[in-house]
Image (cartoon, rainbow, N blue to C red):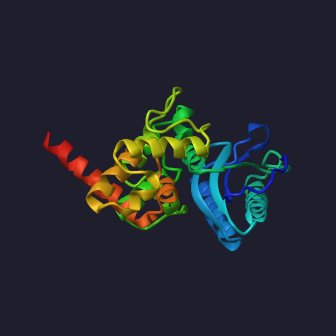
Amino acid sequence: MQRVWRSASGLYHVSARGTGKQLIFENDDDRWEFLDLMRDCCRDKGVTILAWCLMGNHVHLVLADYEDGMSAAMQRLLLTYARRFNKRTGRTGHLFQNRFDRRSLDDDRHLMAAIRYVHANPQEAGICPLEQYKWSSFSEYLRAYDGEGPLGFSNPSTVLDLFGSSKSFIAYSLAISDGPDPMFHSLDQTEWERRVYADNLVKKLGVPLDKLKTVPPAQRDGIIYALHDSGYTVREIERYTGISKSTVSRIVRAFSLVKEQAGCLD
């Protein structure tokens, strides 16, 4: 694998493939063993699993690595699993192609796109709709939003905070298409361009962006939801306005609930 500079964000999309398209899972027992190993190896090295998907001959992970432990965690995971798999099946040689591939996720939009890509793998491969696939963290995300337990192998909280409501997360996850995403601006937009657009949007509503936290809550809350409805994440709104993430999330959830209830009455 080609070495890359450490991500400033600490977030990565990681993949590992069977050598020569070799199947790396022969049955569900193999998959459960890989998941248990994945959790143990990442936990031991301080790596957080944000999303995962197991396919027949490859795996996709989204990881948060703030302590520079990802390489050690992945090496232990792949080597240990390959050794056990080879012993169980009687095969020899490398199970995985090279080491593993990692791509830096440098901002919220790339993180969200990576989560969606990972969860959409079975659908893109023609296996089944992503919400019906058993071997990914998508169902763990839905359980986390519904407040149901137990939690699984991933920690969805970091990603779910970006959306503010279950409806936004589900809509974004299911909006798989070749065209531009109707809910979010281009991933190629710079941070400066996005801030300028947000400032112009808020000024049209009567308040400069950097003064939003000083206006009465009734006016402030509507503008915050307008920003979120225009494709800005909770963390972006926090960063641009200085209003805490918890406050922004609460406002977005409250407005989303009102909209959902109004839709039910139509």
Q: Look at 45% across and 56% down and name the residue there.
A: 141
Residue 116 appears in the picture as rendered? no
Q: Position of residue 102 (x, y in %)?
A: 73, 49
Residue 136 appears in the picture as rendered? yes
Camera-nearest residue between 258 and 13? 258
Q: Look at 55% across and 63% down and name the residue there.
A: 153
Q: Is residue 7 left or right of residue 126?
A: right
Q: Point out the residue furthest to the left here.
A: 265
Q: Look at 55% across and 35% down and name the residue there.
A: 186
Q: Is residue 177 above or below residue 151?
A: above
Camera-nearest residue between 159 and 1? 159
Q: Position of residue 198 (x, y in %)?
A: 47, 45
Q: Look at 85% across and 46% down and name the residue there.
A: 2
- What number of labels is visible? 0
Q: Is residue 188 left or right of residue 126?
A: right
Camera-nearest residue between 165 and 147? 165
Q: Is residue 192 above or below residue 248?
A: above
Q: Point out the residue furthest to the top here.
A: 179
Q: Position of residue 21 (x, y in %)?
A: 74, 37
In which image quadrant can residue 117 be found? top right
In which image quadrant can residue 266 be found? top left
Q: Position of residue 162 (x, y in %)?
A: 48, 54
